[in-house]
Image (cartoon, grey):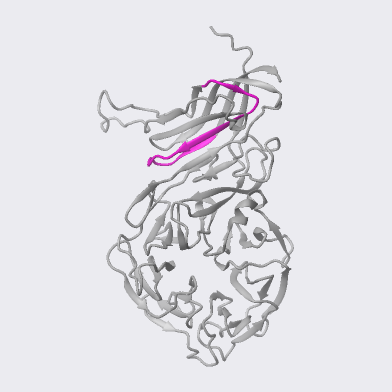
Amino acid sequence: MPDASQISPYTASCGGGLILNKDVYNMQPGEALQLSNFEPSVKGGYRRLNGTTKYNSTIVPQVSASSERVLLSAIFNDIIIAGRGGTVYSGTTSGSWTSRGTSKGTTYTYDFDKFNYDGTSKIIIATGSTNAFTLNTSYTEDIINATGGGTAPTAPKYVKSFANHMFYGGMSNATHSVIFSGPYTEDDFDTGGGEIKVGDVVTGLKVFRDELFVFCQRKIYKITGTSSSNFALAEVAKNVGTIANNSIQEVGGDLIFLSADGLRTIAGTARIGDVELGTISKQVQDRINDIKYDNVTSLVIRDKSQYRLFYPTTASSESNSKGLIAVIKVNPNTNQMGYEYADIKGLKVSCCDSDYISNTETIISGGYDGYIYKQESGNVWTRASTTSSLDSIYRSPDMTMGDPGIRKSMERVNLNWKPEGEVAANLFLQYNYNDINTPQPAVIALTSSTTGAFYGAGSYGTASYGQGDIPITRKSVEGSGFAVAVKITDTSTNIPWSIRGFQLEFVPGGRR
């Protein structure tokens, strides 16, 4: 038998996500220098993303030009409400789109909220170009024109239902105000309605824990109370705000939003009414610096504790469009709860929403090409007339195994993975920081059959019965170096799979 007494193991659990603010000596071995189209998974490791499919194969009709992007994609009453070219439509998974309102404007991404004040569910939509309007379950349009009295807000950009009043913000003639309706009505601004002035330009509204947070360019406020008699405004933060209204989401009991210095949360503390602000994205600050604010939008995938932020530029191609994933989970290397990040590349989103349709969480997004897409569906990026594979990359840190001065002769890589079906990926070892003067070994194919076939369903002589691929795959490798990195790529159209961790077996050599 070969002598294995000199072999040393080095184990890494995949966790921590994309890290761009550490040197290689301070990175944990399971963190990632590259993590694109792999998502940090609450079930452990990094999982290759699902793709997209067309929610409806029929394009949302254009009004004036084929270049019109989708301005609204919302789930309401188990159907899709979509806006394009200033017209708002309703539609399902097939067939044509039905116009529900016209001449709504094309300057801003529409804001919306869902509410029920009188036993009828409604969605209210603000466009920033016209007065807000509602659609009921019969999809009948009702424009907010102060039919109950008072003066309706003019062309608000933001709208949220709070304490059974409707709040409006972002009016061009009242940039520093929020206007609210009377109780249990969205269009009576006389009885019980009013206006609250704040100290900065309003850039977003979000309800969180029985409070309405008013986001401004450089400040954040909150409104508490239940009626015009006791609504109160309090300042939450100075010199912190947002210009990206569509980045504001509730994730894991926190509000997350994009500020000038990165992603932040507003977390309620044990003391009622107290809040703390914290930046949570320093490890991917380089990505935050890339955001041009052409069109920032976001959504939450609840069962994955996942926040997705999309920031494509109008001129960018679909293949070069970017996004960022943030997942709140326990890091296996530190046992600490926190956010882990990954890149999304190849998905050009103009607006999005997530909600339940027939009790199933459904994630939709509107495209710059006029289609509504379903995320978490299929194994490729679906586009107007083509599909594209998810170019997925994981690259570990350059690991020195505790001593950068000792040469390591690699023997094996033991990969802990979780196939969900057939896998066709590639594994690379990169020595000495991928130095061109260091011999680099050839690519190693990672392949996996599907899981075992059931008796009566498989063909004798071709099907494998019982257990599928075991969770540890051993690969003999060659080469040596003072530092080594593991890189895995997948450009196939197979279903997703997960990288859970790996072990490197090496023989220590001489010191340089």
337, 485: nearer the viewer: 485
The image shows residue 279 at horizontal and vertical percentages of 68, 56
Whether 65 is among the magenta residues is: no
Q: Looking at the image, which is closer to me, 426 or 479?
A: 479
Q: Where is residue 320 in the image (x, y as percent from the top left)?
A: 47, 52
Work out whether 248 lies above or below 228.
Answer: above
Q: Residue furthest top?
A: 1
Q: In this view, does 443 lie to the left or right of 259?
A: left
Q: Which of 359 and 404 is in front in this view?
A: 404
Range of magenta residues:
477-500
The residue under the point 31% across, 73% down is 98
Q: In which quarter of the image is the C terminus?
A: top right
| Residue most extreme to the front | 437
Quarter holding residue 293: bottom right
Could you tell me which residue is drawn at 44 percent across and 28 percent down?
A: 445
Query: Residue 324's spot in the image, x, y percent?
Result: 55, 53
Residue drawn at point x = 37 percent, y = 55 percent = 383
Res 105 → quadrant: bottom left
Q: In this view, does 337 lie to the left or right of 501?
A: right
On the image, the x and y values in percent for residue 401 come to: 67, 27
Q: In this view, does 470 lie above or below 236?
A: above
Queried whether the magenta region covers residue 491, the answer comes back as: yes
Residue 352 visible, this orientation: no
